[in-house]
Image (cartoon, rainbow, N blue to C red):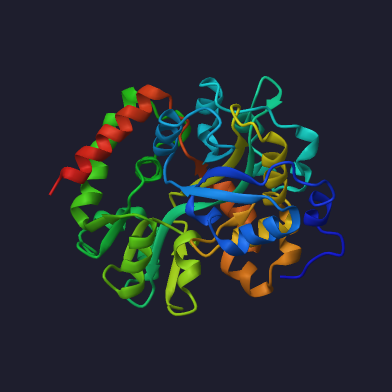
Amino acid sequence: MRLLATSALALLAATPAMAQEINALMWCDHTDAALLDPFTEATGITVNVKEYEGTAAGLAILDQSQPGDWDVFQIDGVDVGRAVDAGLLAELPADALPTADFFPEVVMAEQNGRDGKVYAVTDKFGYNTIAFDRTKVDPADMEDMATLTSGKYDGRIMIYDYYVPIIALTAIGAGAATAEMNVENLAALTEPLMALRRASAQVGDVVSSQTALATGEVDVVVGGGEWLTAVLLADNPNLDWTIPKQGAVRWAESVAILEASTKKDDALKFIQYLVSPEGQARLAVSGCYWGMPANQKAGDHLTDEQKAVLRWDSQPDYLARAQLYPVADAALDTAMQDMWTTMLQAE
């Protein structure tokens, strides 16, 4: 990656760190040493990361922790409001964040803020859609989600094990809007979700989904996308992904400072690094999974090959056709988890 003459890290390092370390509760893409080490080298602040997956799991960890145990929290962008309502997040200084450089669609001011205050900032986004091996399936079939439950690919499909995007993708396949999902209309998605389960060989997390597709154990991953295939392309150039005609789900990661943190200044430095062009470029191609950086200036630090894999030039079309995760209140979240548990237990 090319570095600009004046880097964000140089600016962050100008003020000596007051604390030696901060603790961050993050997804696996934020655990990469190639992302964290440059920040520590420049600031002297060590970032201790605990990995988790799924908002419900993250909130459970916070509930079981002591106040001040965690400083930085990564969360699904649409779930920031839940954390704000619970009093978990500190207000961020809006003028300290380069959101003017972001893709406009992913600033998500309404989701990341409340009553004119900013509580989180988007740092990465991408798509839960259909990933596949184009030598094992007909790529044209992947343009229609109905093909997945037609019987043609029974036993060759894997479902990504995260209930929110898969239920949302099921809604999109059924012609419903994710923004309109609620407890009352959720039941209509039961049969489409169960049909997908019957057509699938297994359900798996990030690593097992990547492994199954790479080894040929399955040929299609529902819920996959660039985040799943990009890290595998060097050894598996036949892997691909698409947004079918019905659309896809756009995921967005937000990062925030916890209200109970006693190291807010250092936590803010870390967040500023994550949304800087350099930090964004490193995060985009993290070893766990790739995704689009929120900050468009990250493109100055990515190679043409990396941008091609991320489909940088296709983003206007993709952003227009994808829907956000549903904004789930406690009742809808519980209902979706119950539906997911029933699906997992089905034979």
Q: Reply above or below: 136 against 293.
A: below
- Quadrant hosting residue 122: top right
Instruction: Identify the residue at image location x=62%, y=32%.
Output: 112
Residue 269 percent location from the top left of the image? 72, 44
Residue 68 percent location from the top left of the image? 56, 31
Instruction: Identify the residue at image location x=61%, y=36%.
Output: 256
Q: Reply above or below: 332 against 298.
A: above
Q: Residue furthest left?
A: 347
User: Which quadrant, please, contains the N terminus?
Assistant: bottom right
Residue 347 percent location from the top left of the image? 12, 49
- Quadrant hosting residue 95: top right
Q: Is 321 in front, or is 155?
A: 155
Residue 217 percent location from the top left of the image? 26, 70
From this viewpoint, is residue 292 visible?
yes
Q: Is 249 in front, or is 173?
A: 249
On the picture, is 262 further left or further right than 6?
A: left
Q: Is 184 in front, or is 100?
A: 100
